[in-house]
Image: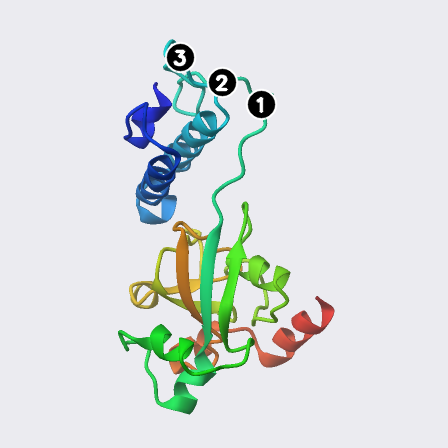
Amino acid sequence: MDPFAVLGVDRDADDETIKRAYRRRAKETHPDRGGTDAEFKRVKDAYETIQAGEVDDDTEAFVDDLGSTTGDPATPPEPEPSTEVTYLNYEVLSDRGWSLDDDDLFEKAAAADLDDADYGQFEVEGDRSLLEAAEDSGHAWPFACRGGACANCAVAVTDGELSQLVDHILPDELTDEGIRLSCNGKPLTDTLEVVYNLEQREDLADLKLPADRFNKARADD
C-alpha cells in the first residue's frame, strides 16, 4: 500500500505536513487508544519509508505486518521527531495554591521564576520514555519499578499526548484525568506539558511501592 495513503497525505506534502500526519495517525492506531501493534507499526514504517526517500512515482507498496511490501530494509530509518516537554513540580501547586484544573497553570509557572527542578523544558528524542529523557537532562524524577506496576512515576498530562502500555496499574478514572506513567510513556505529540512528582495525591497512595523500596531504587540507580 502507498505509505502516503497510510498517513493520509498527498505525495507532494511538505515535511511538516507529513510529520503532523504521522503524529495524528500514531495516536489513532496506538494500542492504548484502541489500535493494534500491527496497525501502529504500519504507520511507523510508512513514515520511515517516506523519510528515507524510498518512495517514487512508481513505488506504491511497502512491507509491514499487515501483508504489504516495503522499501530496502537495509536503509536506516530517519530519527523520530523530537518532543519539547515543559514540566512543573506538583509540590509548587500546593505551595502557591494552584490547581491542575487551572487553565493558565503553565503560564503562571513561567512567570513565577521557579527553580530548574520545579519548572523548565527538555527534549525527548528517538524512542526514549519521558522518564528516561528527564534523567538524560539531569533531573531526578520519582520512580521505582519502571514496569507499570506502581504509580511512583506518575505524571499529569495537561497538554499533548503521552502513550501508556495496556498493562499498567492506573485505574480508568485516573487515566481519564490525564494521569500517565512516565517510566514507559512516550510522547505522541510535538509538545507536551506535564506535572510530575504526584506523590502527595491521596488517590495514588495505594498504587505506589513502599517508601523503603522506592528510596532503594533511587539510591541504586
Residue 145: quarter of image = bottom right
Distance of label 1 from label 2 (alpha carbons): 8 Å
Q: Amino acid at mark 3?
A: Thr
Q: Residue at x 52, y 54 (%)?
A: 124
- Report x, y in % for residue 170: 40, 64
Point out the image quarter for the N terminus: top left
Q: Which mark is residue 12?
A: none
> Disc 2 marks which residue?
71
Q: Are marks 1 and 2 in contact (CB under 8 Å)?
A: yes
Please tell me whether mark 1 sits on a helix, a strand or a loop: loop
Q: Earlier in the sequence, mark 2 or mark 3?
A: 3
Q: Are marks 2 and 3 in contact (CB under 8 Å)?
A: yes
> Disc 3 marks which residue?
59
Q: How many numbered marks are there? A: 3
Q: Residue at x 40, y 56 (%)?
A: 191
Residue 7: quarter of image = top left
